[in-house]
Image (tube, rainbow, N blue to C red):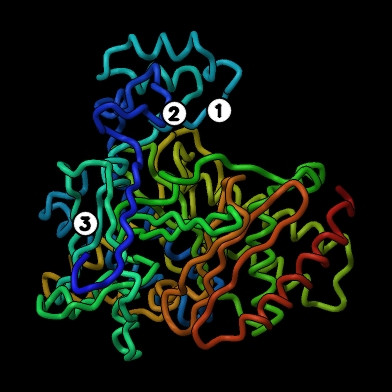
Amino acid sequence: MQSGRRHALRALRIGGPVRGAATLLHESRIPTDHFQDSLPKMPVPALSDTLSKFLYFAEPLVSDDEHLLARRGASAFAGAEGQPRGAAAGVLEPDVFHTKPKVSQTPLWREAVRLMPRSVAFYGAAATGAYALDMSQYANLFRSTRLPRPELDELSTCSDSRHVALFAVCLDGSSPEELGEVNRAMLHGRGIDGWLDESDDTRGIDRWFDKSFQLVVTENAKAAINFEHSWGDGVSVMTDAFTTAALKKGGVSPDGMMQMSFQLAMAKMSGRTVSTYESASTAAFKHGRTETIRAATPESRAFTDAFTDPAATPSARAAAMRAAVRNHSRVSRDALIGARRHGYGSLREGSAPLAPTRLSVYVGAGMDRHLWVLQRMAAERGLAPPLFESEAYRRLSKIVISTSTLSSPALANGGFGPFHPDCFAVGYVIRADGCGGQIMTYQRDSTGFADCMVAAMREMRDVLHVDS
């Protein structure tokens, strides 16, 4: 023992290549990266499709005059501004999601897929309704951490580390006394100044926000996960989706109903329709991460208008609610894995955007990531297209409601931080016996938003079976 201090040694085995240790994981018949070579690459959407969606999703957020300016900017960008520059830049070009589990979640199917060549395994699985997901993020699940840097943190994975950790815990040591030291330790185990100045000996206490994830187990056997997001996305940790029987019986999408309750809550609270983000996985494509599901649409605005209009009949409210929920399901499929391509109307000035209509081509057809890359390319070249200077683009880019569903029966609840001071961050769950979530915000009224959300859910429930 050093300097008379008492130390406790604690050893922890997480599982892995430890000699003589029993494995904690069962061995899969199909190798983890069996589908990786044959996963399709994420396609780049047609510029006209992305711009049409931009105008469609911006419509409920801006005035008619602001939308007209955005339409002119989009038309210019689709012509002389966007396409030649994009072409010159040269850029315009396992988990398994089972759609037929009775066919594909069987030992015979696993054996057949295992014997397929890796180069065609994805397509063989897809033929039976099973869509393999990208597994590249799993390499960073363990042995990974963020290393603080002055301008941008670095994600580091120690590939040669052993899955054994030995901790020497000083029982007589003191915690940081200065609030600034405590705050720095919360950001990174040693505090960012400690990483930049090796003479600083500040230590974190019991929450490590720079590690890929931390499993926190309490004395009463309850557990929680502290999750750092840069190494991967929720699909790598939480996979099995579920729905509530009551909403299914009512013939509506549970997720769509939750999203519309957020829209109605905001309408009740502020009288506005605001830019809303819902996370979607693109893990069906090689190295796919996430795309944005846009919950605020012309259909959602018509729905909130009906529910905030005292003269609206229950039948009118029910019809508007079902139309908005159906439309949200279509928008979600557009951004999610194996989504169907939708048509969002014309770019012609004076023509109204069209609601999504089904086509038969399966592509990854989200809008936000494509539009963001185009904006970054323009900025790097010192360009300022009117499209990206428009009020419509500014409103669409400022997320006011950020949402993500926690789709694992192993999790009771959870949440995440808001993007900026005006943002509501909503982590929500949908279960067989009810639904709920965590609402976090810096400066807004989270209690008021929660009250409006509960009121919205009750009003929507009351008309669920009207004219169903």
Q: Earlier in the sequence, mark 3 or mark 2?
A: 3
Q: Amino acid at mark 3?
A: Gln
Q: Position of residue 367 (x, y in %)?
A: 39, 56
Q: Nearer the viewer, residue 266 or 174?
A: 174
Q: Are marks 1 and 2 in contact (CB under 8 Å)?
A: yes
Q: Is 407 placed left or right of 244 in the picture?
A: left
Disc sitting over residue 99 in the figure = 1
Q: Which of the image's four quarters has the N terminus? A: bottom left
Q: Quadrant of residue 39?
A: top left
Residue under the image location 35 percent in, 70 percent down? 171
Q: Quadrant of residue 209?
A: bottom left
Q: Nearer the viewer, residue 72 or 319?
A: 319
Which residue is denoted by mark 2 in the rendering?
A: 131
Q: Tell me if I can see residue 370 in this picture.
A: no
Q: Nearer the viewer, residue 402 or 368?
A: 402
Q: Are marks 3 and 1 in contact (CB under 8 Å)?
A: no
Q: Earlier in the sequence, mark 3 or mark 1?
A: 3
Q: Gap between marks 3 and 2, in whole Å?
A: 33 Å
Disc sitting over residue 289 in the figure = none
Determine whether 112 is above or below 49 in the image: above
Q: Nearer the viewer, mark 3 or mark 1?
A: 1
Q: Is 412 placed left or right of 74 in the picture?
A: right
Q: Tell me if I can see residue 142 in this picture.
A: yes
Q: Are marks 3 and 2 in contact (CB under 8 Å)?
A: no
Q: Nearer the viewer, mark 3 or mark 2?
A: 2
Could you say whether the residue bearing mark 2 is in a helix, strand or loop?
Answer: strand
Q: Amino acid at mark 1?
A: Thr
Disc sitting over residue 83 in the figure = 3
Task: Farthest residue to the front: give it.
Answer: 4
